[in-house]
Image (cartoon, helix red, strand yellow):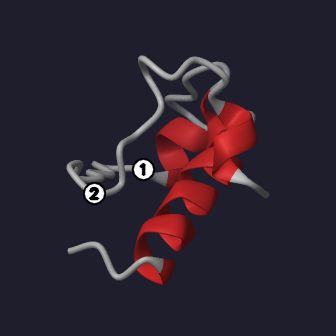
Amino acid sequence: MDTKGMIDDDYIRPDNSHSALLVIDVQCDFTLVGAPFEIPGTFNAVNYIKSLVLDYRKKAIR
């Protein structure tokens, strides 16, 4: 998945040379459909989160 295609607005697209990616507390109890504390829509965001993480790792941004 191309992360550039996810965000069409230059204003909110991550600037990989000056940004940090923080992924905080993505737990199954809040993410999976039908989970005890499901937050609707969170499951659909997981693929985007994964793409962003892979993109940042590929560019060796730390």
Dot 2: element: loop
Residue 46 in picture, x, y percent from top left: 63, 48
| Residue shown at 53% from the left, 67% from the top | 55
User: Which amino acid type corresponds to the residue marked 2 in the rendered image?
Assistant: Ser
Mark 2 Cα shell of 10 Å, populated few (<14), some (14-19), many (≥20) = few
Residue located beneath label 1 in the image: 26
Q: In this view, does 33 lie to the left or right of 9?
A: right
Residue 23 in picture, x, y percent from top left: 33, 52
Residue 10 in picture, x, y percent from top left: 51, 23
Is 3 located above or below residue 57 in the figure?
A: above
Residue located beneath label 2 in the image: 17
State which quadrant residue 36 falls in. top right
Tell me, for residue 57, which label it has, or none: none
User: Which amino acid type corresponds to the residue marked 1 in the rendered image?
Assistant: Val
State which quadrant residue 16 falls in. bottom left
**Residue 32 seen anywhere in this rendered image of the structure:** no
| Residue shown at 30% from the left, 53% from the top | 21
